[in-house]
Amino acid sequence: MKIDIHAHVFPKRGYVRDTFLSVEQQLKANEEQNVDMSLLLPLIHYEIVQTPQTTEEIAEVCREYPDKFLFFMNLDPRMFYRNPKADFSPIIEYYLEMGAKGVGEMCANLPFNHPLMENMFSYIDKYALPLAIHIAPDQYGYYGILDDANLTGLEGALQKFPNIKFLGHSADFWSEISGDDRHGGYPDGPVIPGGRVVELMRKYPNLLGDLSAGSGLNAIMRDRKFGISFLNEFQRTDCILVTIFVVFVIRKV
């Protein structure tokens, strides 16, 4: 069974970028690529879309197409009046009862160690849920959790919240698969030993890879010999899914 673990759909278009698919377009794309199901990630953060959607909206799509879609709930650390002691249990349990399989894609522009983030993480950790994260540099023009090139914040979260299965994603995550000094973007050429992603995956079993989009594709395809060895080393059976077969990977490999 082939499952795409990172998809976004907009049943109601609103004021959003044209790059996001409608439900019908996603179904058609899956059929063309022989993908059995897609995991839908609600985009609730203003950092990425001007008209955020709700988890309920995405859950409704899954109820309409139960054999085609799964979904994650999404949360914002600034919920509940920006209270660093807010109780996330009721809302997490509410979405779990609706059928949510995890949390994400987390795109809020706050550092990993911000009190609001750590409070939210503590509840995701309590329920031992997978969390899809988008990492971004601490500067304007990006969406995602803020971190430095050494992924210091991510490592701190991996240590503090061992029950969360962090699904690493984005150019600022996957560029760190190599030990060179090119951070973010889509570096080319051979992967240099010493990459932080490799180091952290070896050290923390709760860090997994979401290979979606051009960032994951580039990380594996820029150096195919390394890419194959990386997939062989880190393929796992203890998570719902570790890798995603994106259109470009299917066509090129």
Image (cartoon, grey):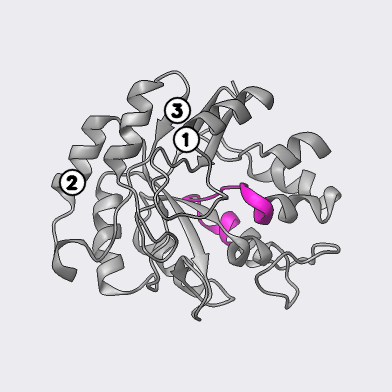
- Report the amino acid beneath label 2: Ile
**Seen from this angle, which residue lies furthest top?**
67
Quadrant the N terminus occupies: top right
Q: Residue at x 65, y 59 (%)?
A: 198
What range is drawn magenta here? Answer: 200-216
Quadrant of the image occupied by residue 177: bottom right
Q: Residue at x 68, y 25 (%)?
A: 32
Q: In the rendered image, which residue does mark 1 sit on?
A: 39
For marks 3 and 2, the one nearer the N-term is: 3
- Give whichever of discs 2 and 1 has the lower sequence position: 1
Label drawn at residue 91: 2
> What secondary structure is found at the residue carrying circle 3?
strand
Closest to the observer: 94 or 220?
Answer: 94
Label 3, label 2: how many angstroms apart (C-alpha)? 21 Å
Q: Magenta stretch containing residue 211, yes or no? A: yes
Image marks 1 and 3: residues in contact by CB distance under 8 Å: yes
Measure how far apart labels 1 and 3 are at the Cα level. 6 Å
